[in-house]
Every structure is written in C-alpha cells, then in structure tokens.
Image: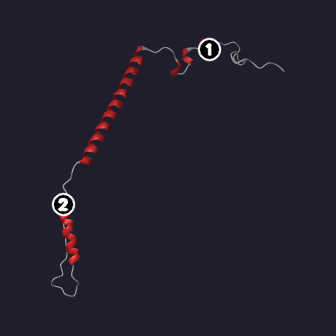
Amino acid sequence: MPNPPRPSDPSWRKGVKPAERKQETLPAWRREEQSPADASNGKRRRTLKISLGVLGMVGGLAGLIVLLIWLRLPRNVSFIFAGSGYEKNLAVPHNAYGWLGLNHLAKWT
C-alpha cells in the first residue's frame, strides 16, 4: 500500500509555492498592500462606526433614564366618592352599611 501524501506537500499542487500567486488574482480582502486612499477611507469608516455606536449607547441610556424618571413621577390622585341614599324611596331598603363603608374609605384616603 503506498504512503498517503503528506499534508505539507499535497500532490495536487506539484511544488507550487503560495507566494508565487499574483496579488491581482487574490480577492480584495486577501491582498497585502493597500493604497493610502483605501487605508484612510477604512480609518474614517471605523471611526464613524465607533462614533455612531457610542452615540447610540449614550442615546439609549438617556432614553432609559428619561423613561425611569417618567414612570416614577408622583401623580396627583383624586377620589370621587359616590353613595346612594334612599331616604325618600321607602320601597328600597336603607343603605346604612354602604354609607359607613364610604366614610371609612374617605378617612383612609
């Protein structure tokens, strides 16, 4: 049984070295050299992305703080106590317990 090819020397490459490939044939992300215009443009984009990220985080934090303050603000509360009195209508039973409960609720608030 023949020995399998070694991983460092694949049989399909036949002695071609990786450094012999031309830079034009490589994808743009694999090329080693960049022109100065591309490098400065990349730095600007990176700076812009970082700035927008920081600005978004600060805006989100400010919105969260405003939301928490808005939810915790004390609000004025008004109670309206309405009770029914049947003093003039004798066909309906009296509502003494209702008035007593209403008075207790008014004192509690």
- Give residue 15's position: percent from left, percent from top: 69, 12
Report the label total: 2
Q: Is residue 15 above or below residue 88?
A: above
Mark in the foreground, 1 or 2 = 2
Residue at the (23%, 84%) spot, across then down: 93
Q: Secondary structure at mark 1?
A: helix
Q: Secondary structure at mark 2?
A: loop
Residue at the (40%, 16%) spot, across then down: 37
Q: Residues within 10 Å of mark 1 (few under 14, many from 20)?
A: few
Mark drawn on residue 103:
none
Mark drawn on residue 78:
2
- Give residue 91's position: percent from left, percent from top: 22, 88
Residue 21 appears in which quarter of the rendering? Answer: top right
Residue at the outermost left position: 88
- Give residue 12's position: percent from left, percent from top: 71, 19
- Give residue 89's position: percent from left, percent from top: 18, 85
Q: Nearer the viewer, residue 20 or 75?
A: 75
Residue at the outermost bottom position: 91
Q: Is residue 79 above or below residue 70?
A: below
Residue at the (39%, 20%) spot, across then down: 43
- Locate the N terminus by quadrant: top right
Q: Is residue 78 above or below residue 47?
A: below
Q: Residues within 10 Å of mark 2 (few under 14, many from 20)?
A: few
Residue at the disc numbered 1: 18
Residue 4 appears in which quarter of the rendering? Answer: top right
What amino acid type should be assigned to the residue bearing mark 2?
Ser
What amino acid type should be assigned to the residue bearing mark 1?
Pro
- Locate the C terminus by quadrant: bottom left
